[in-house]
Image (spheres, grey):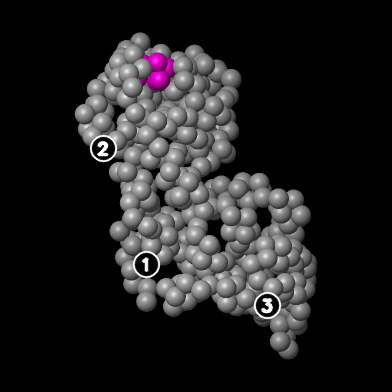
Amino acid sequence: MTTSDAEFLSGRALSRLLYEEAVRPILERLWPGLPHAAALVGAGSEVLGFDTPRSTDHDWGPRLLLFLTAADAAAHGTRIHRELAERLPKQVHGHPTHFQQVNDRVGHLHPTDGPVNHRVLTLDTRSWLTGQLGVDPTAAELTVRDWLAMPQQSLAEVTAGEVFHDGVGTLSAARQRLAWYPDQVWRYLLTCQWQRISQEEAFVGRCAEVGDALGSAVVAARLVRDLMRLCLLLGRRYAPYGKWLGSAFGQLPVAEKLTPSLQGALAATEYRQRATHLCNAYEVVAALHNETGLTEPLATTCRRYHGRPYRVLFAERFANAVAETVTDARLRLLPRIGNVDQWADSTDLLGSQELRHAVIDALP
């Protein structure tokens, strides 16, 4: 039986079954009492809860991360991997445990009669966390620059997913510590996100005024994306990478009310319609901001942009109001550019710890 023949289970559910029915019994028999954590965290749509039958075509299946102390990982990791290859069942609820490598990066589930090429990785918790984030969240207090250098997509991958067992506690403690930004960092990031919107909200109209319909539509799309990310910040939820941004936004309570306006702005081919939809969206998000109580309530209605005939929210009012609540001296000295994924969306940059820290270290 192949994956296509089996009933679809979410990756999280399949990972839990793999641990409870197959991996844990082997560990208890061969390494009784070995302190470990078992989890599905890190990369993968199933970690974020967005996997579908389409996800099963590569790098998806019964997989698991086993976290040990550094000493235990060094002492037992190789043997655990070998014993699991020999002892794991060939299938878990109809899904093969053998990953057939197509190239160095992609694996497809495939039945086998021999040892399984499994995806149960044995890891040192601290090393894995540092590899994911670029900093060790189990060590000393995280600095402002540490928080700004960690992309939201990486934080989402570490804090999402599911921990099935944690007999050590290190992984669960780190996930709790990283669950959301410190209050002052959060306020600074909100300031910067409102600032991004303020810088371009008038350009939708200006582009249209000079006959640049395409430019107007592109700016509108950028603003829609920024509004979605702002809502995720207001909702205390890390934004995933681009493929799942809309899915994550769609789970927010505000999405039902806001989505028609965002879709209308993207679908509009005429400026007045586009502007109407954007203003409706601005006013919904402004009201959402007021509901947080982070600042004194601000007017939520759009108005003319100075003497020009474009209607805007004047989002800088919100940026300034939140900035006034940032009392951390280190954050108050920084320009309003935010964390690494507020001013860069290059996949290569966000995936490189060295580059991320280099640019953050260049800040005042």
338 to the left or right of 286: left
First-in-chain label (2 vs 3)? 2
User: x, y percentage for residue 31?
Assistant: 30, 19
Q: Are marks 1 and 2 in contact (CB under 8 Å)?
A: no
Whether residue 100 is visible, yes or no, is: no
Query: Is residue 293 placed above or below 178 in the rendered structure?
Result: below
Whether residue 41 is visible, yes or no, is: yes
Amino acid carrying label 2: it is Ala
Q: Is residue 23 highlighted in magenta?
A: yes
First-in-chain label (1 vs 3)? 3
Q: Residues within 10 Å of mark 3 (few under 14, many from 20)?
A: many
- Magenta extent: 22-27
- In this rendered view, identify the residue nearer to me: 107 or 141: 141
Location of residue 29 by image quarter:
top left
User: Which marked residue is nearer to the observer: mark 1 or mark 2?
Assistant: 2
Residue at the left extreme of this rendering: 75
Instruction: Identify which residue is drawn at 32% across, 18% down.
Output: 32
Instruction: Tell me the distance, in whole angstroms, between the alpha carbons under discs 1 and 2.
Output: 29 Å
Label placed on residue 70: 2
User: x, y percentage for residue 165?
Assistant: 45, 29
Residue matched to label 1? 360
Amino acid carrying label 3: it is Phe
Query: Is residue 28 placed above or below 15 in the rendered structure?
Result: above
Location of residue 221 by image quarter:
bottom right
Label placed on residue 314: 3
Q: Main secondary structure of the magenta part?
A: helix
Instruction: Identify which residue is drawn at 75% across, 71% down.
Output: 300
Q: Residues within 10 Å of mark 2 (few under 14, many from 20)?
A: some
Q: Is residue 51 highlighted in magenta?
A: no
Instruction: Tell me the distance, in whole angstroms, between the alpha carbons under discs 1 and 3.
Output: 29 Å
User: x, y percentage for residue 303?
Assistant: 76, 79
